Image (tube, rainbow, N blue to C red):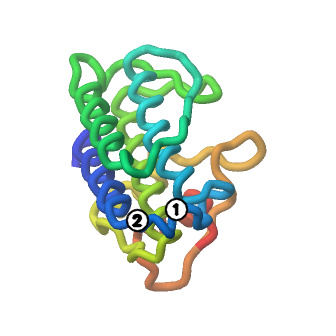
Amino acid sequence: MESVELFEAAAREFRAVVDMVDPEQHHLPTPCAPLDVRELISRAIGHQNWVRSAIHGDASPPDYPPIDPDTWLDAFDESTAAMLDELRSEGAMTRSVTLAAGLTFSGEEVALLAARNIFQFAWDLATAVGQNPDLAPQVATELLEISRTRLVPQRGSGGFFGPEFVPSSGAPTATVLAGFLGREV
């Protein structure tokens, strides 16, 4: 899949998981500690908005305001539509984009990072609320390969990712990706 299509597929997975979250699950812990379910969903939407702004040239720091659970799906749909519009805009894929810690990527790489992030949030959320973590195997496979070869996580002191965790044999690819990205699986 191309980077924009991969982002769109990953966003669909996140939306599907959010759509099945029950109110009594809002305060459950997630693998993305210290965030609970409610905070993780708000973070995912806020992160997507921040990345979209960075692609557009805004150097503002990320902002993750709490989002009312009654508006999660609408907020995510709006954020995703705006992100797709930005990714499809003239020159977006070749634009140089500066993200956290002054790291600079091409727009295409940012689209892949955004796909990986929202997919990881989908796995975190599915795992937290007891949904099947075997999310979109083709998307998971592509993101794992990209993560291993092109956009290797920055690990260690000052990095964004913890050590790799290797799941048990036969784990879904989404779980293997989560472990590669430092989630305890």
154, 73: nearer the viewer: 73
Q: Amino acid at mark 2?
A: Val
Q: What is the total number of numbered labels drawn onto the structure image?
A: 2
Residue annotated with mark 2: 21
Q: Amino acid at mark 1?
A: His
Earlier along the polypeptide chain: callout 1 or callout 2?
A: 2
Question: Splitting the image into 4 quarters, where does residue 134 fall?
Answer: bottom left
**Residue 27 rendering spot, x and y as whole percentages:** 58, 62
Question: Splitting the image into 4 quarters, where does residue 75 fall?
Answer: top left
- Please give the name of the residue rendered at 53% of the width and 54% of the height, measured from the top-left corner: 38
Instruction: State the mark number for residue 26.
Output: 1
**Residue 171 rendering spot, x and y as whole percentages:** 45, 80
Disc 2 packing (10 Å; few <14; some 14–19; many ≥20): some
Task: Quote the CA–CA distance across marks 1 and 2.
Answer: 8 Å
Locate the C terminus and report the quarter of the image it occupies.
bottom right
Secondary structure of the residue carrying numbered label 1: loop
- Please give the name of the residue rendered at 66% of the width and 58% of the height, measured from the top-left corner: 33
Disc 1 packing (10 Å; few <14; some 14–19; many ≥20): some
Secondary structure of the residue carrying numbered label 2: loop
**Residue 176 rendering spot, x and y as whole percentages:** 48, 69
Q: Residue furthest right?
A: 157
Confirm or deny contact between disc 1 and disc 2 (CB under 8 A): yes
- Please give the name of the residue rendered at 26% of the width and 46% of the height, measured from the top-left corner: 8
**Residue 85 rendering spot, x and y as whole percentages:** 23, 28
- Left or right for 88, reference 161: left
60 vs 50: above or below: above
